[in-house]
Amino acid sequence: MAPQDSLESNSFSGDKKAVFTVSDEEKASPSTTEPVYDGDQYLGQAPTEEELNTLRKVAGPVSGSGYWLCTVEFAERASYYGCTWVFQNFIQYPLPPGGNGAGASAPGSEKPAGALGQGLQVSSALTLLFKFLAYCIPIFGGWLADTRLGRYKTICIGVVICGVSHVIMVVGAIPSILQAGHGMAPFIVSLMILALGAGIFKPNISPTVMEQVTFKHPYIMTLKSGERVIVHPETTIQRLTLTFYALINVGAFFGLATSYAAKRVGYWLAFLLPGIIYFLMPIILALVYKKTIKTPPQGNILGDTLRVIKLAIQQNGFRKFGSEAYFDPVKPSELARKGIASYKGKPISWNDGFVDDVRRTLVACQIFLFYPLYYLNNGGIGSITNSQAGSMTTKGAPNDLVSNFNPLTIIIASPILNYGLYPLLRKHRIEFGPIKRITLGFILAALSCVVGALLQWRVYETSPCGYYATECDIGSGVSPLSVWAQIPMYVLQALSELFAVVSGYELSFSRSPKSMRALVVALFLFMSAVSSAISQAVVPALADPHLIWPFVGTAVPGVILAGVFYWMYRDLDKETFLREDSDSQQEILSEKDKS
């Protein structure tokens, strides 16, 4: 801890002689003459400015059980996507004529599997409601973990809740229940419980994984070849996050098995298989418990965060909100120079580093505001891509099968990026920071919607029912256009996620203080909920003969906003990736402490 000076001065509320302490100027990284430590373990010397610009950057060690926790996410996503991949057909289409009564299609039929027969709009509405809740509830899950229970315990609670959901879902898909027309009630109950459990689990797993990278500053290491390299936390977290996201999509690829199970056997098996995978999670969590680096709850620092923002607005108004100098006037070191020592009669409870964290977090949240439009491009609005596939020739394959090319592409491309492209760029000193990656992801997602619009146009042109292809009963009822023509659309979506979504996870972790990481991740996930809400508002318009326009209506503004985004935030790639935790430099009094 740096030496501290006691100051007596006025306060914001006008009280006199209030005493508070201000630490010396805090550093975002060690000086170039200092060694770098991880706790008590010596890692190496900090690089000089010249070395940072000339030496190659490599990934460093991951402490604890980081990669094991990635397998936990795999099991959770396998169960989540394994179920949700077949939700749309389960809701939209009735039990197929000539089928086995469990939702499976008759042998050789082009008709998709189905069960409830509620139509496209109800299917879109329910799946969007589920997605909205699953990405809105994380705000509660993040707050609960950061302030009350800690992330690991909150993860375990989410696991239990989702387990209950899987049991109800399987029971509700028993053939006798579906044939009696009673499948809707248990399905909706299980849907809501699954959204609750996933919402509690999801915001806590990624920061827990990334916290297994314990060193905060780059350091010099000499390889066996004699090459001197920089072991960098940004490179390490980038590699770990890509692995994390790849395993998410290994789990998502489980939708291939459930799609075929629904098509060939029925929905009871399609829902049972993800449940079996899901119950691997408690076993893995128990095995890695002692090896996992856990962050205890930090108390409620949201109050301090809001106070810092409020005071900054009072000092500066809204001009240049969030800029680097915007929050300088509310740093305790600056307030001391003005003779201000307390706020509303209480000593100021934050330090200069905490103010910097608030600024960095707010910038990240501003970036997140671009993501709702991105998510509309990345998958289309509602169920239109799945419905489009249902109007195309499948030759007996499930109409939702081709969507599995999204996770398949991610599984293949992740190691190529991790061990091929990114190291090659670093070797040639080509900076490809998070802002550039996010911009590229936005553009790729918009291009996927261009492909979707062209495919929908071809479906309309070649369907026996013309521009009313969705519920067509003339002839085969489908366009001769093969469903495999959708592959480029899903490949573009997958590549966009590897750049935009993975970088979003990195920013939500690196630009937030340790005591707010789950909540900031939750805010990032909440952007998907906002996207679902927008989709929900336009569901009534998802009808023939207008299904080309939902693709066009998001693709065009998506390209424009990608350019605006890069212009606004291009300088962030030059900022320090991971700051020293402000709450490890000076104690931050939480709301709980104050009470």
Image (spheres, rainbow, N blue to C red):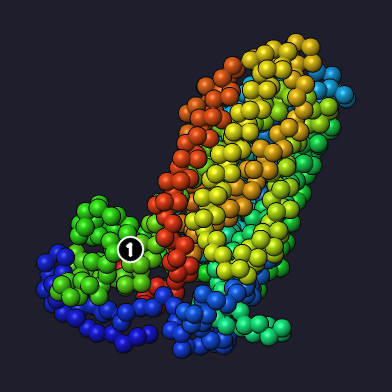
Q: Is residue 552 left or right of residue 590?
A: right
Along the viewing direction, whichever of 328 and 203 lies nearer the viewer:
328
Q: Residue at x 66, y 27 (%)?
A: 455
Quadrant position of the C terminus in the picture: bottom left
> Callout 1: 10 Å neighbours few (<14), some, many (20+)?
few
The location of residue 400, given as percent across then percent down, is: 73, 33
Q: Residue at x 25, y 72 (%)?
A: 332
Q: Count up the numbered dots.
A: 1
Asked if 514 appears above or below 133 in the picture, the reply is below
Q: Residue at x 56, y 19 (%)?
A: 546
The location of residue 500, given as percent across then percent down, is: 55, 51
Asked if 297 appears above or below 494 in the picture, the reply is below
Q: Which residue is mark 1?
A: 324
Q: Residue at x 60, y 47 (%)?
A: 496
User: Disc 1 marks which amino acid?
Assistant: Glu
The location of residue 108, given as percent across then percent down, is: 87, 24
Query: Is residue 36 in view?
Result: yes
- Label 1: which secondary element: loop
Q: Is residue 190 left or right of residue 317?
A: right
